[in-house]
Amino acid sequence: MIILAGFLNLGFQVLPMDDLRELYQEVILDHNQNPQNFGRLESHTHSGDGYNPLCGDKLSLTLEVENGEVKDIRFDGSGCAISKASASIMTTVIKGKTVSEAESLFDSFRELVTTGKSNRNNLGKLVVMAGVHKYPVRVKCATLAWHTLKNCLSGSSEVAKTE
Ligand code: ZN
């Protein structure tokens, strides 16, 4: 119960406890409480912001891309548990990947969180987010970091929006 106090920002969607347990798997809770790669890279080649108006999640990414490979990545911002955990997990998965691998992962991840499964086998630890597909509002929270990443990598200076 102490752990549950860590994600009071549930937006306007009230979920029964069983659903909460399913959605907020331990890995997600852990990334929410101890986000990986949190902060900003002083030296970076790409940066961008994302905003999910439905939930109020805000996110900034900084990336160091060299020879088509993501050498380093950081995120910061404020948002619900799902948006924060998803951004944290994304940074751990993206680091060391090429830009085209990152784009392919985004497609797999979007398929996973909208349908609950993916036939691609490149998801790795991202599969913990599969339960999100049952909560359409949460899909936007989960994909915010990825939309922002895509914008960053394409060199767009616009704020990435989930709407
Ligand atoms: Zn959210």
Image (cartoon, rainbow, N blue to C red):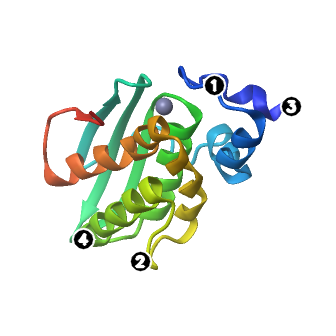
Q: Residue at x 47, y 63 (%)?
A: 93
Q: Which mark is residue 100?
A: 4
Say if mark 3 contacts mark 1, CB within 8 Å: no
Residue 8: x %, y % from top left? 67, 22
Which residue appears at 36% of the width and 70% of the height? 97
Residue, disc 2: 120
Q: Where 162 falls versus 119 (above or below)?
A: above
Q: Which residue is mark 1?
A: 14
Q: Secondary structure at mark 2?
A: loop
Label of residue 1 in the image: 3
Secondary structure under badge 3?
loop
- For the residues marked 2 and 3, what is the alpha-carbon distance in whole angstroms? 36 Å
Looking at the image, residue 159 sits to the left or right of residue 31; the answer is left
Q: Is residue 155 left or right of residue 50?
A: left
Q: Earlier in the sequence, mark 4 or mark 1?
A: 1
Query: Few, some or many C-alpha atoms within 10 Å of disc 1 (few <14, some 14-19, many ≥20)?
Result: few
Marks 2 and 4, how far apart at CA: 15 Å
- In the rendered image, residue 24, in percent from the top left (x then y), is placed at 67, 44
Mark 2 vs mark 4: in front = 2
Residue at 71% x, 29% y is 6
Rendered position, 46 above or below 118: above
Q: Label 4: few (<14), some or many (≥20) within 10 Å?
A: few
